[in-house]
Image (tube, rainbow, N blue to C red):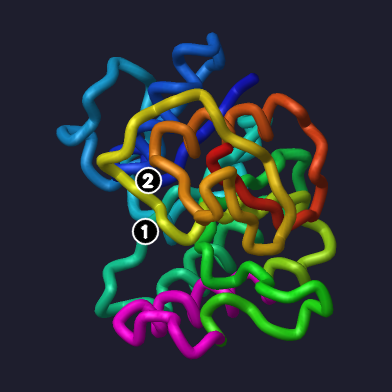
């Protein structure tokens, strides 16, 4: 597949880039600064908001691994809005690196993780913005998208074990009764989801076994 990765030099974006290359996909990095790119792959160097419909039309898949600065959480909404807009008239599918805060914590689907009493206040602005971006994406009829939340404990330093599960839009616990996933296992699960080609217009998640 031809895969474009927005934010391919970020923590998760880099791992997604490496995993996609490892699996033999044709990968292009969509980045602000090519000097931060560690792999010898084609790239488009420009601001996310300057990407055009023509530039993304060449990809089978567009991965949104953009991570907004904590002081500007609203960029989660505006960036995803722009990507959905430029994909609206094409066939390119959008896969989003989402947040755990938007996962439901009850079977009745009345409460999301960021709405619980124990949710860390410091992460609340980002979680709310990412949730608002997801809701806006759901209302976008023409774009084909898949929103992939990590588990609540999203560990950059964690070991890549190849032991993970593709789960629903509910907070899912592993065999140790924890909501946990390492960045490495998330990247592997994310590529599994892309290669599955299902999950059209769905919010799903990845959790360790």
The tally of labels here is 2
If you read the primary sequence from the N terminus, does the residue marked by circle 1 or circle 2 appear first?
2
Crowding near pointer 1: few (<14 within 10 Å), some, many (20+)? some
The answer to whether residue 55 is seen in the rendering is: no
**Disc number for residue 7:** 2
Callout 2: SS:
loop
Q: Quadrant of the N terminus?
A: top right
In this view, the residue farthest toward the front is: 176
Which residue is located at x 41 percent, y 83 percent?
124
Left or right: residue 19 versus residue 109 is: left
Stretch in magenta: 116-136
Q: Are marks 1 and 2 in contact (CB under 8 Å)?
A: yes
Viewer-proximal residue, 135 or 161?
161
Viewer-proximal residue, 152 or 194?
152
Classify 154 as above or below 189: below
Residue receiving disc 1: 67
Q: Quadrant of residue 175?
A: top right
Q: Quadrant of the C terminus?
A: top right
């Amino acid at each position: 597949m031809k895969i474009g990765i927005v934010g391919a030099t970020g923590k998760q974006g880099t791992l997604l880039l490496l995993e996609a290359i490892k699996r033999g996909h044709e990968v292009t990095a969509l980045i602000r600064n090519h000097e931060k790119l560690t792999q010898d792959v084609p790239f488009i160097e420009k601001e996310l908001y300057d990407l055009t419909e023509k530039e993304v039309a060449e990809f089978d898949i567009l991965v949104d691994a953009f991570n907004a600065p904590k002081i500007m959480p609203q960029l989660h909404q505006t960036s995803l809005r722009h990507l959905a807009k430029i994909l609206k008239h094409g066939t390119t599918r959008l896969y989003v690196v989402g947040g755990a805060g938007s996962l439901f914590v009850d079977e009745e689907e009345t409460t999301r993780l960021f709405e619980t009493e124990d949710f860390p206040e410091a992460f609340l602005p980002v979680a709310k913005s990412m949730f608002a971006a997801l809701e806006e994406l759901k209302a976008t009829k023409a774009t084909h998208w898949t929103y992939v939340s990590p588990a609540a404990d999203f560990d950059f330093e964690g070991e890549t074990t190849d032991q993970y599960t593709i789960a629903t839009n509910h907070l899912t616990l592993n065999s140790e009764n924890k909501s946990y996933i390492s960045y490495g296992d998330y990247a592997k699960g994310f590529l599994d989801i892309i290669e599955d080609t299902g999950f059209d217009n769905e919010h799903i998640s990845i959790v360790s076994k």
